[in-house]
Image (cartoon, grey):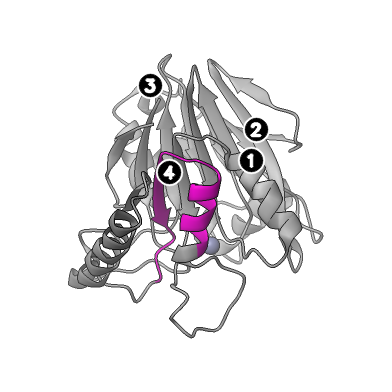
Amino acid sequence: MKMQFWGVRGYVPTPGAEYLRYGGNTCCTALYGAGGELVILDTGTGFCQLGDTLMTREFGRGCGEMTLLITHTYWDHILGLPFPGIVHIPGNRLHLHGPDSTRGSLEMVYNGMLSPVYSPVYGLAHIGATHSFQPISTEPFMVGGMRVSALPLSQRNHSPIWAYRVEEGQRSLVYITDVRYTDDQIWKQALQFAAGANTLVHSAPYTRAEQVQDYGHSRVEDAIELAQEAAVERLMIFHHAQARTDDQLDALVSGYRRQLGEDESPLIFDAAREGDMVDV
Ligand SMILES: [Zn+2]
């Protein structure tokens, strides 16, 4: 299984020369299975460029199929969904998995994004590709040869946030975002879910030293501690704060790597960059 980052920024898209190396699109990560499976984790603005590249494949001919795993419906995780040409081509099939909020289902949220208030599409009924919405549960399911598990990790106001674990053969990837470990229960659940994963992709927009308004996000140290306790091989942080420049991210990565080296930790640590392709 290979993984490619298409959007690694949190909150809002971040254009600008200081952000080019890590990238300014919001959350979107693609998983490519050995059998040709395509699984997308979140559909922030990074989904638009991913969609453009897929136009040269079967999606451009209206015979593409993908599975979308949505963690929650805050803008930075769904904003790209209606924009790529591939979602407007009849014949393409999108299977969406994700939590409903207390104010409406995932399908209602998506339909709302396409309402005449926001878009000329006039709703899901008028979009070309077939969208199917699958109820989310903790029951694992298969996408070809990939096994997907989901876990509700936190409830932020009206929007539940789920984490995903995808396994293929002996390899495993865990994707956790927008979680603040406010109690032991959440920590233990995350620990169990991430246990022994080859790669953990974890949001970490801030460090503990930074005094920021907290809306329920992890700090880099939280992600590192979770990865170490869960015996994860490689941690890749993402959902970078929008003001964090390339140079600042470089410095952050080298600082934590130095610390891990001094602690003789075997953890491989990196910050996700748009376009990076990783062997899970
Ligand atoms: Zn977010």
Residue 128, given in percent of the width and then of the height, sits at 53, 35
Question: How far apart are labels 4 and 2 at the CA level?
Answer: 16 Å
Mark sitting on residue 99: none
Name the residue carrying label 4: 29
Q: Is residue 198 above or below residue 191?
A: above
Name the residue carrying label 3: 58
Kind of residue at disc 3: Glu
Question: Marks 3 and 2: which is nearer the front?
Answer: 2
Mark sitting on residue 149: 2
Residue 79, given in percent of the width and then of the height, sits at 50, 57
Question: How far apart are labels 4 and 1 at the CA level?
Answer: 19 Å
- Per the rendered image, the range of residues in magenta is 222-241
Label 3 C-beta lies within 8 Å of the nearest ligand 1 atom: no
Kind of residue at disc 2: Ser
Question: Marks 3 and 4: which is nearer the front?
Answer: 4
Question: Marks 4 and 2: which is nearer the front?
Answer: 2
Residue drawn at x 38%, y 46% is 267
Relative horizontal placement of residue 71, taking residue 267 as reference (left or right) = right
Secondary element type, mark 3: helix
Residue drawn at x 37%, y 49% is 265
Secondary element type, mark 2: strand
Residue 54, given in percent of the width and then of the height, sits at 35, 32
The mark nearer the N terminus, 3 or 2, is 3
Relative horizontal placement of residue 100, taking residue 71 as reference (left or right) = right
Secondary element type, mark 1: helix
Residue 160, given in percent of the width and then of the height, sits at 72, 56
Question: How far apart are labels 2 and 1 at the CA level?
Answer: 9 Å
